[in-house]
Image (cartoon, rainbow, N blue to C red):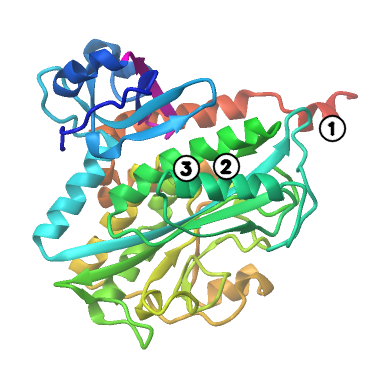
């Protein structure tokens, strides 16, 4: 990682930022004058509190990647933010660090002449801060809502921080919006920039007196927030996908995504709430299938996009932003690469609207279902060596933490239970 960076004089503090095992941002603040030492030696932290280790071996250091620096203006202060990788105190990589694992995967693929471009889609809701109701009743690509000014501020901020955005628009649910960046030629950069963009969205919402959430399903009866990932693959500089049909290599990659889809759910849809989004009728995938323009399938091949994008890409639709984004991208790529190695067969393209068919009709087509809940997804993860390996040394801790999450939810007493059972 490059280290030729200096902190500008106008910066008030430096933030060392990274994601915990669940994908939530964590941060250590340091004064600018200590950055030169931290850049070389790292900053110590207790990794057991982030889910990555036991208390018996919890000392790690956060090492800033100088290439990721962004100067964020919070109004009262300017902060130089660096994304970090986690290492052991002796400086060796922690083989369970999500960012390191993704970077390692891309370096290994590059050595084999394979490059992967990604284009995420970030969906989020803007809610009232008091009652968490949607802030507007807008519809898909609504021309003007109460939050038009905030959307303009977001667009301006994206430009100021040099994030290349294709579009920002209202989505189908009340108070729901989407940001689509231009395609990235580096999945690591895509994951890094999402960490910043999510923070900027939340900050701009707070400045406007509202609340922004990327929670998968914040509103019952409405569409939820996904994190769709478009992937384009290149081998020796040539597209593996084509709008004119799937090459054998591309079909293998697609087949790998479908083969591992059940286990992938534990990584890309990793919360209790994720599975309240993945239900029929809201353009969220439920069935392990692929198609062209079909929005009822798990993986589709979009027909829209720029001339360059139309040369070939696929869209994986089951993910959401409650995932650790580095884990998400790494697991998807590893699953696809495994399919290429094994020449996995993705089966026939699905042209029907699966949401209009019964479960029996779908089963008769040979189509399987994604896990219906987090517990089922974790069962599938335990059986899938490829997806397990994509989590590196964090696998055991990840599985344990997610199992605990299921137990905690099952033992909780919800408002729904109180409304329906309290009068017994």
Name the quadrant of the N terminus. top left
Between 42 and 330, the one lying in front of the other is 42
Disc 3 versus disc 2: distance between alpha carbons?
11 Å
Q: Residue shown at 36%/32% (left/top)? A: 398
Q: Please tell me whether residue 118 belongs to the stretch shown in magenta.
A: no
Query: For the residue carrying disc 1, how many other residues have a C-alpha within 10 Å: few (<14), some (14-19), or many (20+)?
Result: few
318 vs 30: above or below = below
Disc on res. 197: 3
Q: Is residue 386 left or right of residue 109?
A: right
* Residue 345, quarter of the rendered image: bottom left
* Residue 65, quarter of the rendered image: top left
* Sequence order check, earlier mark of 2 and 1: 2
Q: Secondary structure at mark 1?
A: helix
Pointers 3 and 1 in contact (C-beta within 8 Å): no
The residue labelled by disc 2 is: 214
Disc on res. 420: 1
Does residue 330 appear anywhere in the picture? no
Query: For the residue carrying disc 3, how many other residues have a C-alpha within 10 Å: few (<14), some (14-19), or many (20+)?
Result: some
Q: Is residue 47 left or right of residue 119?
A: left
**Residue farthest to the right?**
423
**Residue farthest to the top?**
56
Does residue 33 appear anywhere in the picture? yes
132 vs 348: above or below = above
Disc 3 versus disc 1: distance between alpha carbons?
40 Å
Q: Is residue 413 left or right of residue 62?
A: right
Q: Residue shown at 36%/64% (left/top)? A: 231
Query: For the residue carrying disc 2, how many other residues have a C-alpha within 10 Å: few (<14), some (14-19), or many (20+)?
Result: many
Residues drawn in magenta: 18-31
- The image position of residue 76, as x and y in percent, is 53, 20
């Amino acid at each position: 990682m490059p280290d030729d960076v200096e902190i500008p004089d106008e910066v008030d503090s430096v933030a060392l930022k990274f994601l915990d095992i669940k994908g939530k941002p964590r941060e250590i603040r340091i004064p600018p004058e200590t950055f030169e030492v931290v850049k070389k030696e790292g900053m110590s932290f207790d990794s057991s509190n982030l889910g990555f280790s036991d208390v018996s071996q919890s000392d790690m250091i956060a090492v800033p990647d100088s290439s990721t620096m962004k100067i964020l203006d919070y109004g009262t202060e300017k902060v130089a933010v660096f994304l970090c990788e986690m290492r052991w105190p002796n400086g060796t990589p922690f083989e369970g660090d999500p960012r390191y694992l993704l970077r390692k995967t891309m370096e290994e693929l590059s050595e084999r002449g394979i490059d992967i471009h990604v284009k995420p889609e970030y969906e989020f809701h803007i809610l009232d801060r008091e009652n968490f109701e949607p802030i507007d009743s807008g519809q898909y690509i609504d021309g003007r809502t109460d939050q038009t000014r905030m959307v303009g501020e977001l667009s301006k901020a994206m430009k100021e921080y040099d994030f290349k955005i294709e579009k920002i628009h209202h989505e189908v649910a009340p108070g729901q919006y989407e940001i689509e960046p231009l395609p990235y030629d580096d999945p690591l950069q895509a994951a890094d920039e999402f960490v910043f963009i999510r923070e900027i969205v939340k900050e701009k919402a707070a400045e406007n007196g509202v609340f922004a959430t990327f929670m998968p399903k914040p509103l019952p009866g409405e569409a939820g927030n996904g994190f769709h990932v478009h992937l384009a693959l290149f081998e020796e500089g040539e597209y593996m996908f084509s709008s004119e049909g799937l090459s054998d290599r591309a079909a293998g990659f697609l087949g790998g995504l479908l083969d591992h889809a059940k286990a992938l759910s534990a990584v890309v849809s990793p919360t209790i709430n994720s599975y309240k989004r993945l239900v029929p009728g809201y353009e969220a995938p439920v069935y392990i299938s692929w198609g062209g323009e079909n929005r009822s399938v798990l993986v589709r091949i979009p027909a829209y996009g720029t001339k360059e994008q139309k040369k070939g890409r696929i869209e994986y639709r089951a993910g959401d932003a409650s995932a650790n984004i580095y884990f998400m991208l790494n697991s998807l790529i590893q699953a696809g690469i495994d399919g290429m190695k094994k020449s996995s067969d993705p089966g026939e393209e699905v042209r029907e609207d699966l949401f209009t068919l019964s479960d029996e009709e779908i089963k008769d087509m040979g189509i399987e279902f994604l896990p219906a809940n987090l517990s089922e997804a974790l069962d599938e993860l335990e059986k899938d060596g490829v997806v397990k390996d994509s989590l590196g040394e964090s696998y055991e801790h990840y599985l344990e933490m997610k199992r605990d999450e299921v137990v905690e939810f099952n033992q909780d007493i919800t408002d729904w239970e109180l409304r329906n059972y309290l009068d017994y």
